[in-house]
Image (tube, coloured by chain):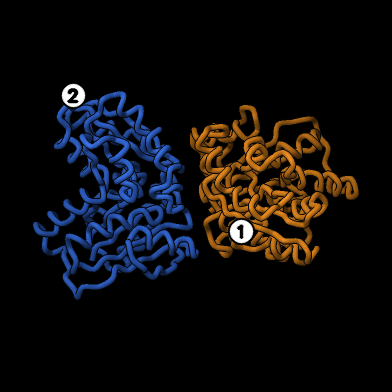
Chain colours: A blue, B orange
Amino acid sequence: MIGIFDSGLGGLTVVKEIIKKLPNCPIVYFGDTARTPYGTKSAEIVTKYAIENTKFLLKLGAKIIVVACHTASSTAMDKLKEVFPDVPFFEVVTPSMRKALALTKNKKIGLIATRTTVESKIYDRLFAQADPEVKLYSQPAPLLVPLIEEGWLKRPETRRIVKKYLIPLKMKGVDTIILGCTHYPLIKKVIQEKAGKRRKLVDPSEEVAVEVEAFLKKHPEFYTEGEKQEPKIFVSDITPNFERIACLFLGRRIKLEKVNLE
Amino acid sequence: MIGIFDSGLGGLTVVKEIIKKLPNCPIVYFGDTARTPYGTKSAEIVTKYAIENTKFLLKLGAKIIVVACHTASSTAMDKLKEVFPDVPFFEVVTPSMRKALALTKNKKIGLIATRTTVESKIYDRLFAQADPEVKLYSQPAPLLVPLIEEGWLKRPETRRIVKKYLIPLKMKGVDTIILGCTHYPLIKKVIQEKAGKRRKLVDPSEEVAVEVEAFLKKHPEFYTEGEKQEPKIFVSDITPNFERIACLFLGRRIKLEKVNLE
């Protein structure tokens, strides 16, 4: 069983990609909707939440954990591995970094993300280690999450704001842009349109699914095959609006189940 | 000492209005920035948080409590009065309702607010009790909080989105609009511009300050006069961005202090 958590429902884009690759592997998801968003909170608080979320998924039988939240991927991984040394962890930052490195030709890479992900400088550090020649240009894009959660996926306001966020990256001449938040794949078309056809986009949800699939092929002891089944989606708070957003992300109706971690 | 809490920093508009009226009354504020926003969370969770926040403020010496959060004002008041029967509570919904009633001539009133405040139907219930002839038209405006917190107070994107939110209310012919969220006073000028000069706006931060002042004049036993001093601002999580937003709301630099309620 694969356990996946996110600060909210954005990580369902990761669930969607993993189902595409491993349709028969049971999935349990936890969206921390009572404490969302993590993107504006401090590293200390986010780490505390990440540990609680992991405990919950392990208790339900998860054998590997995918941290589908960029903020937690940026700030909580060292502590998670320390607290749960026997659990294979996956996160959304490193696979995107690797993919961007493979795609870029001019070594100028752009990043759009929440303010906390940008300020964590996690991508800067990873690129500096992997290839010091890479120039990373980061653009905080804090309005995209609320626009997406509103379902304003193609509206003129969304287009205008995406365009505004991309201008500084285009001015720097980046040839590759990392979508540094699990929400962004929902407006990938708008982003591609405003970025220009020749710029390559890196979708972290796709990249982490590739890594999980490769890992499970190498380590079948962590793989549980079952009947093809709906993923189990738990949340820490439930509202009609969350159910609407979950459908938006998964592309179909899904039942949410509420749990209290505190 | 007056205790004021909000889900985040928006309630600082209430602090600002109370300081205008009672410059020598000590104020302690708690912004629940670790668990913000309340506007998307369920009534159950919001009530739990409201009780914790009140306990914290009372422990610091607050004698009256102002619930500066529309979501908590809409959903948690009954429970708060039950749990703390000796504490005078003020909230931002009733005073705005009264003011709107006093202002409207055609009895068509508009409300812009977060989705949770609109869905709580608190204003509908209050108006139905106060004057069954009033027609209330409610418009969820969930993008305004993130736009304001970005500091995009006068940007074209903000103007466009405000305009879009107001269209349905204007179509209904409302002559008065309640700004149903403590963030909105920061873009009152834009809202007034898009609503048209003749429509009256009700600012809940102003109205609750009027009520608190009137109460303290009648009940001096709850009033503590001191040296003129800075309000004490506590938050459950602190980031450079929160400090920036706090300055935006109070109109000057202010030190935030972090506390852990959990």
Q: Secondary structure at mark 2?
A: loop
Q: Is residue A114 above or below residue A30?
A: above
Give yes or no for contact between labels 1 and 2 (Cβ–Cβ under 8 Å): no
> Where is residue B201 drawn, in percent x and y?
72, 44
Foreground of the two, A9 or A248: A248
Residue at the image position 28 percent from the left and 41 percent from the top: A192
Position of the N terminus of chain A by quadrant: bottom left
Foreground of the two, B214 or A78: B214
At label 1, which amino acid type do we have?
A: Val
> Where is residue B202 drawn, in percent x and y?
73, 46
Q: Residues within 10 Å of mark 2 (few under 14, many from 20)?
A: few
Circle 1 chain? B
State the residue position of label 1: B118
In the rendered image, which quarter is residue B233 located in?
Answer: top right
Is residue A226 something one can see in this rendering? yes
Q: Is residue B230 above or below residue A71?
A: above
State the residue position of label 2: A133
> Where is residue A205 drawn, in percent x and y?
26, 51
Query: What is the number of the mark on residue A71?
Result: none
Q: Is residue A172 above or below residue A10?
A: above
Q: Secondary structure at mark 1?
A: helix
Q: Residues within 10 Å of mark 1 (few under 14, many from 20)?
A: many
At label 2, which amino acid type do we have?
A: Glu
Residue at the image position 14 percent from the left and 37 percent from the top: A102
Left or right of A84 on screen, residue B104: right
Left or right of B141 on screen, residue A40: left
> Hey, which residue is sitting farthest left in the picture?
A218
Left or right of B188 on screen, residue A74: left
Q: Are marks 1 and 2 on the same chain?
A: no
